[in-house]
Image (tube, rainbow, N blue to C red):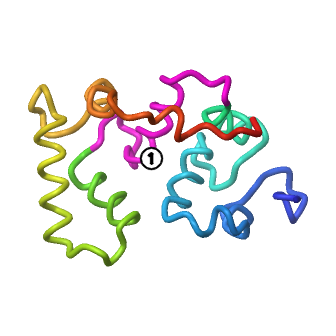
Amino acid sequence: MKLDKDNSGTIEREEFLSLPQISSNPLATRMIAIFDEDGGGDVDFQEFVSGLSAFSSKGNKEQKLRFAFKVYDIDRDGYISNGELFIVLKMMVGSNLKDQQLQQIVDKTIMEADLDRDGKISFEEFTKMVENTDVSMSMTLDQF
């Protein structure tokens, strides 16, 4: 399967989204943004390999956690804000929850995870929040 359909040497957002496995994922746009490390709007080979490495069975747990954290850290400031958490969870639940219900979940999550009470979740706080889940196994692809 060829990703770079226009032979530009990079993979554009539309090329990523043309893959059924990607386009059906509610977090597809976030994944593309994470792969696009320089924010240039496309993914070059180095960025693609770097992004995929988080899903390798040889990748370590911290690498996988950092990728998961980046899904929520939309503005790349190193923190997950209330608004960012709302946006990403909204992508996942769609219209299955009313915004008010979702906001209550977001507020409760921030309150529980925000150990230093600065109103946002740092990577360290995120790690503590998910330490009892098996994030690293759910982010591992057998083929890599």
Residue 121 lies within the magenta run: no
In this rendered view, identify the residue nearer to me: 61 or 37: 61
Quadrant in which the C terminus appears: top right
60 horizontally vs 16: left or right: left
Residue at point 76%, 55% (across, down)? 11
* Rendered view: 112 above or below 32: above
In this rendered view, identify the residue nearer to me: 108 or 122: 108
Residue 69 lies within the magenta run: yes
Residue at point 66%, 67% (across, down)? 17
Crowd class of label 1 (few under 14; some 14 to 19; many from 20; radius 10 Å): many
* Rendered view: 9 above or below 114: below
Provide the residue span drawn in magenta. Answer: 57-80
- Give coordinates of residue 44: x percent, y percent: 75, 44
- For disc 1, the marked residue is 71
* Rendered view: 114 above or below 30: above
Which of the 4 image quarters holds residue 47? top right
